[in-house]
Image (tube, rainbow, N blue to C red):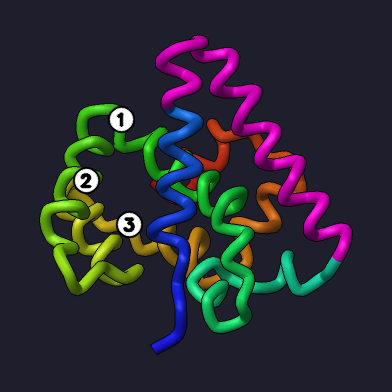
Amino acid sequence: MERCRFFDEAFASYFESLAVREFRGQQAFADDMEKSRKVFVQWVEAGKQYADTPIAEYGKHELGQLSYTNGGWSLYALHAPMGEDRFLQLTRRLVAESGAVGVDFEDLQRLAEEVAQRKLDSYFRDGFYTAESSRLLIDGVPIERIASRDR
């Protein structure tokens, strides 16, 4: 089984940004997320493989460090359309159901769809299984457009 640091690092990074929002306000949160975008773009400028590798394959290619940037953005893009209550419900369920065995992207999708009460195939395809999420970050697409795609 390949290592997948996404579920530790992306969530840790994103929840750090949410703490910034809680203590310093919405603008500080937005600034923090843009900083993550810029760091991701710097990685891409250093190596093309960073733009071409889907998040679900970061472990396979030992690119877990990208979970802090693109991973955090992928959670931001999921959180925005789900809303605060449903996103927190999803997080609680992930923690409760992961136990000692952990979760994978299929588990995340299943739980997100149950909580959102709708299919999220396009989001998961673009966000995790293809490099589309990287392209959106590199192109500077605003979160509102990312979150509303195919919803």
Query: Camera-side residue: 10 or 150?
Result: 10
**Looking at the image, residue 120 lies above or below residue 11:** below
Q: Amino acid at mark 2?
A: Leu
Is residue 143 toward the left or the right of residue 34 in the image? left
Residue annotated with mark 3: 120
Amino acid tagged 1: Gly
Q: Position of residue 24 (x, y in %)?
A: 51, 10
Mark 2: few/some/many CA within 10 Å (<14, 14-19, 20+): many
View extreme (right): residue: 45
Question: Label 1, on which residue?
Answer: 83
Q: Residue at x 47, y 33 (%)?
A: 16
Magenta region, residue range: 19-46
Q: Position of residue 59 (x, y in %)?
A: 52, 76
Please state which of the two labelled residues, at mark 1 or mark 3, is closer to the viewer: 1
Whichever of labels 2 and 1 marks the residue nearer the N terminus, that label is 1
Residue bearing mark 2: 90
**Mark closer to the observer (2, 1):** 2
- Residue 14, given in percent of the width and then of the height, sits at 46, 40
Main secondary structure along the magenta-highlighted residues:
helix
- Asked whether the residues under the numbered discs 2 and 1 touch, taking CB atoms below 8 Å apart as contact, a structural biologist would say no
Q: Report the amino acid beneath label 3.
A: Leu
Task: Tell whether label 2 touches label 3 (CB within 8 Å).
Answer: no
Disc 3 from disc 2: Cα separation: 13 Å
Q: For numbered disc 1, what is the local secondary structure?
A: loop
Q: Quadrant of the N terminus?
A: bottom left
Front-lying residue, 97 or 130: 97
User: Mark 3 or 2 closer to N-term?
Assistant: 2
